[in-house]
Image (cartoon, coloured by chain):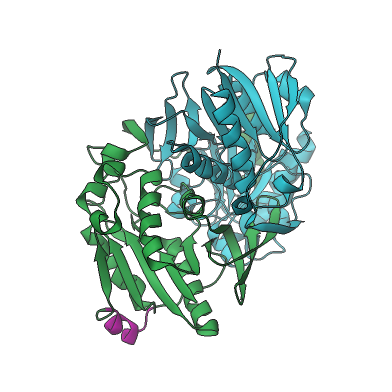
Amino acid sequence: MNIVVLVKQVPDSGAERTLSADFSVDRASSSNVINEMDEYAIEEALKIKEAHGGEVTVLTVGPAGATESIRKALSMGPDKAVHVQDDTLHGSCAVATSKVLAAALRTLNPDLILSGAESTDGRVQVVPHMLAELLGVAALTGARKLTVDGSQLTVERQTDEGYEVVTAATPAIVSVWDTINEPRYPSFKGIMAAKKKPVQALSLGDLGVAGDEVGFAGATSQVLEFSKRPARTGGAKVVDEGNGGEQLVAYLATEKFV
Amino acid sequence: MAEVLVVVENGVKKVTLEMLTIARGLGSVSAVVFGDADTAKLGEFGAEKIYTASGEDVDGYLVAPKATVVAELVKRVQPAAVLLASTQEGKEIAARLAIKLDNGLLTDAVALDADGTATQAIFAGSAIVKSKVTKGLPIVTIRPNSVTPEPSAASPAVEQLTVAVSDTDKLTKVVQRVAEQKGSRPELTEAGIVVSGGRGVGNADNFKLVEELADLLGGAVGASRAAVDSGYYPHQFQVGQTGKTVSPQLYVALGISGAIQHRAGMQTSKTIVAVNKDAEAPIFELADFGVVGDLFKIVPQAADEIRKRK
């Protein structure tokens, strides 16, 4: 099975994050990492390859610095990577990014596309369905379990109420939550091997995407204002000396919750 | 006055009423309902018109048919805006709609002005942006607990839509829908009060304490990632970076240290109360009221005290 995993480099969600002066996500002042949820997608791809054979390709759209995350992804075990990199991509919205990803995916012609359910920077969750719409393939999103039987895919999709069992035939895109598996740690051998794995660089020209369809020029939405919220400050803190529960309820009562 | 479409995916929820309230500021409100329409409730909150779409072609497949139905309606009535709930499915319909109409979209808005400017909380609620769709009409998903729903009586006319979906809309079949535990509790993202347990709760059985306090307060139950990863509570109740974002009036954190991944999902709550045995736990930096101590003593005592006051 020809599997492509979408990998996004994001600012570390454990550190301070901000927007640049042009209101794009500031990727310079923070440490950048693989979007955590994508590691689960990589693990799932590797498991399917181990069980059914095939090839796993990592696909990233991002600036030059994203190479670091691509090598990290490859160190887990995928065979190769494609990096779409073009200065005009800076400031692209989700719609434009999806168009670029779709163009790259057409050149790769995968049976299965895997992605994280959301990225930790935008948390927008829209890319998998945008790709399905652009490529005319099935989307099985929010998976907590994926079963592959030949060309038939079955997913347990997490919902607010419980879960849904959804099925489709390949080609398809599946997005995964972090409940689906436990990603492997890269081995030393994997890290060394990753340095030699092919990473193909593609520009927008290579993909036939016009520059005015992406970046700030092609953006379908615009940020007008950005401001930091004032940090919360802690209030009263009491140490329980036998009546902590009562004190808690007394506080809730003054705030009219009981 | 142009119509504003409010998409109702899965029955009328609190966020539906919030959307209707917001939509009234942008135009004449039309609800697009999948399944049976609660005409009375939608009318009570200002829906002038209700479009319904139902049947196996809508229910039997994942999301795509709903997006097609909404897209066809948009082309026909040329609305001023389309509002959807910031749920998984709401965002997915919005995603497909944006591609079908080659249109911008904004997700997770907590406010929407009459001119289509949306307010969004980003980076774990640490920052606020104001944004606008610059291509096409505003397609905006609204996060639950953003505004207080306000009734405004209307008598909606109901129109049943003809559903004409393509084969590509039917690629992903829904073969089973399984409801898991929740009981009569309010839905996590919509609840006015959320009581969450973390690693400090110790095991799945002890989550009964969290549930008991939630039930006494009329709230929903949440869990930290540590608690979910340890198997204490199901993932759909996870609050934080890789789970749900909640913004209730009251958030009660029991045995939760307050790692940044958890704060990401709850720090826009109005009032935060915490119980933790570690006086240095970062959750106390957020909490309006904190109790340092053993939650297994404090929570049962609090529960008794609430019963006494009732």
In the foreground, A223 or B55: B55
- Name the residue located 44 percent from the left edge and 29 percent from the top edge: B118
Q: Position of residue A138 (x, y in %)?
A: 57, 58
* Residue A7 seen in this snapshot: no
Q: Is residue B310 above or below residue B156?
A: below
Q: Is residue B309 above or below residue B220?
A: above
Q: Quadrant of residue B218?
A: top right
**Magenta segment: does it hold A134?**
no
Q: Main secondary structure of the magenta part?
A: helix
Q: Position of residue B212 (x, y in %)?
A: 74, 49
Q: Which residues are magenta?
A: A186-194
In the foreground, B13 or A169: A169
Q: Position of residue B196 (x, y in %)?
A: 61, 50
**Magenta segment: does it hold A190?**
yes
- Name the residue located 46 percent from the left edge and 21 percent from the top edge: B113
Q: Which chain is green?
A: A
In the foreground, A111 or B112: A111
* Residue B96 seen in this snapshot: yes
In the foreground, B168 or B157: B168
> Does residue A173 appear left or right of residue A225 in this picture?
right
Q: Position of residue B17 (x, y in %)?
A: 66, 27
- Name the residue located 31 percent from the left edge and 49 percent from the top edge: A16
> Does residue B114 appear left or right of residue A197 in this picture?
right
- Name the residue located 62 percent from the left edge and 20 percent from the top edge: B29
> Does residue A226 appear left or right of residue A127 in this picture?
left
Q: Which quarter of the image is occupied by the C terminus of chain A?
A: top right
Chain B drawing hue: cyan
Number of numbered discs visible in the structure rendering: 0
